[in-house]
Image: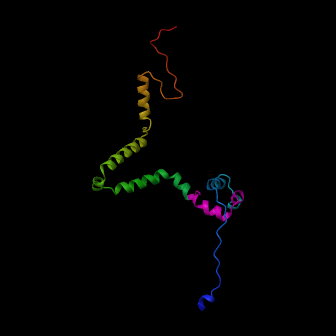
């Protein structure tokens, strides 16, 4: 008991009183307006440390910009690395549904790479069917053509 008497009284630390940082607004103020953490903190009624803590890891860096400018090449290399690790045995192990889905996704990506559309095929078929049925096409700018079989007035 004598040992405890010699210890100084340690008071628990008070919780922070930082006002919650509006992350979306803070990022906008930092990236679009170029404001400092101190200026953002003043606007939000918080502290510069709290603003820094909450948004610094979300801000783009120089490497972010490099990645964005080279994204296609980086992703192509990553695809190549992944695909070269897959052999026939791996493909056979995958469930049938996964294999079918993979083929469908690769087919869509192949069409995109070749400049062929993948998203409007269903829409085109629906428009053709509507035209054949002489129904309006679901297109705000669509103007039906006059019926060529009607007698001219």
Please identify the quadrant where the N terminus is shown.
Answer: bottom right
- Asked whether 145 falls inside the magenta stretch, the response is no
- Asked whether 46 falls inside the magenta stretch, the response is yes
Left or right placement of residue 46 versus residue 96 in this view: right
**Residue that lies at the very extreme toward the bottom in this rendered image:** 2
Q: Where is residue 112 shown, x and y percent of the image? A: 43, 42
Residue occupying image coordinates x 53% and y 52%:
68
Nearest the eye: 78 or 41: 41
Left or right placement of residue 16 versus residue 77 in this view: right
Residue occupying image coordinates x 55% and y 58%:
63
Q: Which residues are magenta?
A: 40-62
Using the rendered view, name the quadrant where residue 11 is placed.
Answer: bottom right
Q: Number of callouts in the render? A: 0
Q: Where is residue 108 shown, x and y percent of the image? A: 40, 42
Q: Where is residue 49 shown, x and y percent of the image? A: 65, 65
Nearest the eye: 35 or 6: 6
Secondary structure mostly seen in the magenta stretch:
helix
Vertical relation: 3 (above or below) 44: below
Q: Where is residue 64 shown, x and y percent of the image? A: 55, 56
Q: How is the image coloured?
A: rainbow
Using the rendered view, name the quadrant where residue 9 is placed.
Answer: bottom right
Left or right placement of residue 88 versus residue 13 in this view: left
Vertical relation: 97 (above or below) 63: above
């Amino acid at each position: 008991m004598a040992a405890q008497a010699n210890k100084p009284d340690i008071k628990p630390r008070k919780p922070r009183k930082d006002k919650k940082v509006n992350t979306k607004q803070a990022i906008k103020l930092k990236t679009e307006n170029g404001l400092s953490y101190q200026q953002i903190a003043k606007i939000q009624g918080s502290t510069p440390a709290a603003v820094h803590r909450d948004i610094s890891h979300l801000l783009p860096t120089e490497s972010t910009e490099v990645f964005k400018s080279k994204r296609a090449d980086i992703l192509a290399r990553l695809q190549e690395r992944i695909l070269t690790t897959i052999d026939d045995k791996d493909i056979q192990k995958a469930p049938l549904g996964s294999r079918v889905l993979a083929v469908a996704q690769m087919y869509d990506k192949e069409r995109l790479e070749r400049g062929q559309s993948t998203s409007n095929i269903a829409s085109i078929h629906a428009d053709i069917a509507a035209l054949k049925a002489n129904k309006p096409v679901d297109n705000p700018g669509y103007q039906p053509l006059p019926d060529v079989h009607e007698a001219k007035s």
